């Protein structure tokens, strides 16, 4: 009965549409973001961003009281299932998202007046969600800084130093001092294992210098004195909250100047992981260096006007893969902003620069020479 479908559709507001999308969120996630993966025992759907590339920055809840809600921790975008449809399929247009969702749910179409009314309701609801999100972000920033300050600067022999030195072969004695952005928490609670572990923490700063998030690498301090990543499904996690445009400011380079006081003509070395970046920093401490924690965060990285060259530490993702395509887009974007852009890439089959240095260390001296 087509008329019944149209009458039912006319009674459904944006909130109800979003609720119905949430009821089918598992199917919707695979439809909108087909390159995503399950996380936390199929409770989350994870990918790099609303563009759908592989990664972990975007988290979509698949069950529980927040079912259908999503947050992109690199860009700060968040919302309900209808907001996700708008961002992924409708260029941010909530009115078009309502129509798309109705078609996908099989609820039929609306007359123009009803569609306009629902669009206005959806926009008002979005404004309210934005106000709540701003309040939540402020609380998240305060919590992230509190956790980071609860740690201590890295010192030779502590768990953070040993993780970098022994597990990653990063020799920080080559530097004048450990990076200020890194600290060690002796026993930081981990939600996956429901117990504390030592944790290497990194301060994530917004473009204006605010400490907006804290990245955590949980560590396993073993009885033999060695330290490795904790045996968890996800030993590396940033705290709840976004860091749009921001990064971990790991090293100041030859000038030693703070971020906003750097000299003109500056080169910035950037990479996803702290380990890759620190590997290069110890070899080339004259370059200013940052970690962005995901390829999806690189495209939005905001650099001061003094920066004229960006050197990216690339990983060996398969050519043509979503991750490789996302990196190509990000580098094109930075070139379009007037930067000279280059990439450092390890030889295959090494996955990344740090893995390559470990492989070199394992070779006999006559082979390495």
Image: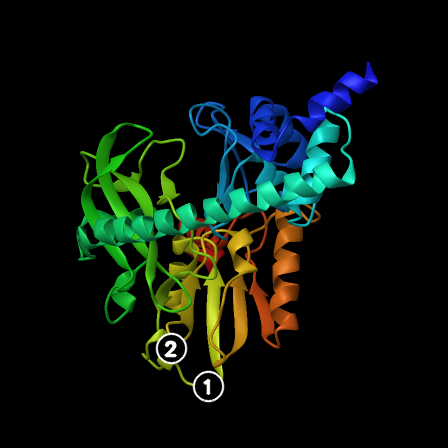
- How far apart are labels 1 and 2 at the CA level? 11 Å
Count residues near mark 1 (Cα–Cα under 10 Å), then give few for <14, some for 14-19, many for 20+.
few
Residue extending furthest top? 1
Q: How many marks?
A: 2
Q: Residue at x 71, y 30 (%)?
A: 102
Q: Is residue 247 left or right of residue 228?
A: right
What residue did someone put label 2 on?
A: 260
Q: Is the residue 241 above or below the residue 204 in the image? A: above
Question: Whole-percent x and y of residue 33?
Answer: 63, 36
Question: Whole-percent x and y of residue 5?
Answer: 76, 20
Q: Secondary structure at mark 2?
A: helix
Residue 38 in view, yes or no: yes
Q: Is residue 162 left or right of residue 38?
A: left
Asked where in the image residue 20 lies, by quadrant, the reply is top right
Q: Secondary structure at mark 1?
A: loop
Residue extending furthest front? 113
Q: Is residue 29 left or right of residue 131?
A: right
Comparing marks 1 and 2, which lies closer to the viewer? Answer: 2
Colour scheme used in the picture?
Answer: rainbow
What residue did someone put label 1 on?
A: 264
- Which image quarter holds the N terminus? top right
- Whether tag 1 and tag 2 are in contact, CB under 8 A, the answer is no
Question: Whole-percent x and y of residue 11?
Answer: 66, 26
Q: Residue at x 33, y 80 (%)?
A: 257
Residue extending furthest bottom? 264
The mark found on residue 306 in the picture is: none
Question: Whole-percent x and y of residue 265?
Answer: 49, 84
Q: Is the residue 291 above or below the residue 235 in the image? A: below
Depth check: give the residue in front, 306 or 96: 96
Count residues near mark 2 (Cα–Cα under 10 Å), then give few for <14, some for 14-19, many for 20+.
few
Q: Residue at x 31, y 79 (%)?
A: 256
Residue 253 in view, yes or no: no
């Amino acid at each position: 009965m087509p008329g019944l479908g149209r009458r039912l559709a006319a009674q459904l507001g944006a909130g109800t549409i979003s609720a119905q999308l949430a009821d089918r969120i598992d199917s919707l996630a695979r439809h909108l973001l087909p390159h995503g993966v399950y996380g936390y025992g199929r409770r989350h759907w994870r990918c790099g961003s609303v563009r759908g590339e592989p990664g972990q920055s975007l988290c979509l809840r698949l069950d529980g009281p927040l079912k259908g809600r999503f947050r992109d921790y690199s860009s700060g975008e968040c919302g309900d299932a209808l907001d996700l449809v708008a961002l992924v399929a409708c260029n941010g247009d909530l009115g078009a998202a309502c129509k798309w969702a109705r078609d996908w749910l099989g609820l039929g179409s609306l007359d123009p007046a009803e569609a306009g009314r629902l669009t206005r309701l959806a926009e008002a609801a979005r404004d309210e969600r934005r106000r709540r999100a701003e309040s939540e972000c402020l609380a998240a920033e305060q919590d992230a800084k509190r956790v980071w300050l609860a740690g201590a600067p890295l010192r030779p022999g502590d768990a953070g130093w040993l993780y970098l030195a022994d597990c990653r072969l990063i020799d920080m004695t080559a530097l004048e001092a450990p990076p200020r952005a890194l600290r060690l928490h002796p026993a930081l609670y981990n939600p996956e294992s429901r117990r504390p572990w030592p944790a290497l923490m990194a301060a994530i700063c917004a473009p204006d210098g605010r400490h907006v998030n804290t990245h955590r690498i949980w560590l396993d301090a073993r009885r033999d004195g060695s330290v490795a990543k904790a045996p968890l499904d996800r030993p590396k996690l940033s705290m709840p909250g976004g860091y749009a445009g921001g990064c971990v400011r790991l090293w100041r380079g030859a000038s030693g100047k703070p971020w906003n006081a750097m000299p003109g003509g500056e080169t910035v070395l950037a990479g996803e992981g702290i380990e890759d970046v620190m590997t290069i920093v110890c070899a080339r401490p004259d370059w200013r260096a940052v970690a962005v924690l995901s390829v999806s965060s690189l495209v939005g990285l905001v650099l001061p006007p003094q920066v004229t060259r960006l050197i990216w530490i690339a990983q060996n993702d398969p050519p043509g893969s979503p991750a490789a395509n996302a990196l190509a887009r990000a580098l094109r974007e930075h070139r379009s902003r007037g930067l000279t852009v280059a990439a450092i890439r390890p030889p295959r089959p090494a996955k990344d620069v740090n893995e390559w240095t470990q492989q070199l260390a394992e070779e006999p001296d006559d082979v390495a020479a």
